[in-house]
Amino acid sequence: MTKKFIDEYSLAENRAKSKTSYFIKQIFVPITFISSGTTHHVSTEDEYCTLIDMWMHEPEDITNNLLSGLTEEEFSLLKKIATKVWLITKNMNYQAAPKTGLLRQIYQRRLINNFFPDANSILEVGPGSGYLSLLLGMDKKNVFSMDITQCFYLWQNYLYESFNLLNEFVTLEKIETKKDKINHLPWWKFIEHEKIFKKLDVITVNHALCEMGNHAVRHLLTVAHKSGYPKFFMESYGSFKYSHKRSDIEPLFREFGYKETYNKNDVHIFEYDNQEVKFKRTNIINIIVYIPFFRTIIRYIYNEVTLLKSIANLFLSKLFSGLSKKKVINKYNYDDVLKFYYELTGSKIYKTPCEEINDNVCTPKINGIKAKLAYAKFDEKF
């Protein structure tokens, strides 16, 4: 396979870096990938198959509980996208079809369409494997898709082009947006956002906000101020091991006039509200707030309470497992999904490579223990 676009991307990025200030370049650094030692570059298109689905956890729960089954339309979209990816990865390092990540982004698409039925102009920051932007593009939304991670950006380009929905800005000499395409923005073109879009309806950042640096989030909030104060939608804040804690997000957004208007099941919506917030504090409270070790103690207590909640939820879910499962109300459940993947791939219980390694390495080896409990103490630091 050729690597023409990979070379074009590298050349354009290096040229942009040579003309961009140090501070601005610092904003667009994938700090979570770097801090965790995760590879975030590819050299050939043959490697794209490794990026088609990075999600590993609980596809059955996503299908039957979060989505309460797939509608006819959603199942059709799942089949269309998975089949296309299966075909275009045939001659790569290995053949694969997205499943868990695609299901999750079908869930995100449903939420966006339910919460913002009139939204047309949508910016997605950090699309990852790219299926949410693809789905919104297939919905005829005016989509802007921006990613700072080289490997994902290159895969997104390949994916969007495969569906004839790509308007690529890396190779675009003159800025020209297209409403019937996915406007794909590298970080150095995103800096010129005022020339690209004047008004946005929604900005969505899923499983990524806490993985961004402080100045990166501030830059995004500044973009929002200059783009008509769009609503923010986040389905999960993402990992908080290397950058922001969950407790950092609401105050940071409040600095820019945004107020959280929805917070349920790790789905967050922020809307602009520039009403001044006045905090009246006594001198004693001011002293307490700014004592470093006191803040550390409060955060430690919060962590322990969160762990206790995880244990309690696990116990209750096992105790009332028969009652806790939602009834699948839509037409297609997870068995139907597995049947489709069996027809597509020949595997009765098809798993992506990421799912396989998760099941082999991360799944507890003792019956009755949930994996999320094993992660709770180490990952859920607020």
Image (cartoon, rainbow, N blue to C red):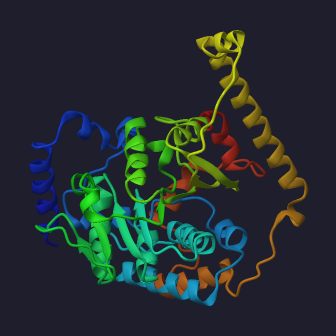
Compare residues 8 and 48 and report the one nearer the observer: 8
Looking at the image, residue 2 lies above or below residue 308 = below
Q: What residue is drawn where x is 87% and y is 50%? A: 316
Is residue 293 at least partly visible in the picture? Answer: yes
Q: Residue 68: where, in percent of width, then height?
A: 72, 75
Classify the position of the N terminus by image quarter.
Answer: bottom left
Compare residues 179 and 237 and report the one nearer the observer: 179
Q: What residue is drawn where x is 67% and y is 85%? A: 332
Classify the position of the C terminus by image quarter.
Answer: top right
Looking at the image, residue 122 lies above or below residue 13 = below
Q: Is residue 151 left or right of residue 355?
A: left
Which quadrant of the figure has residue 289? top right
Q: Residue 260: where, in percent of width, then height?
A: 63, 49
Q: What residue is drawn where x is 64% and y is 85%? A: 71
Q: Residue furthest front?
A: 275
Q: Residue 223: where, in percent of width, then height?
A: 37, 51
Is residue 90 at least partly visible in the picture? Answer: no
Q: Residue 358: where, in percent of width, then height?
A: 54, 54
Looking at the image, residue 299 lies above or below residue 7 = above
Which quadrant of the figure has residue 234? bottom right
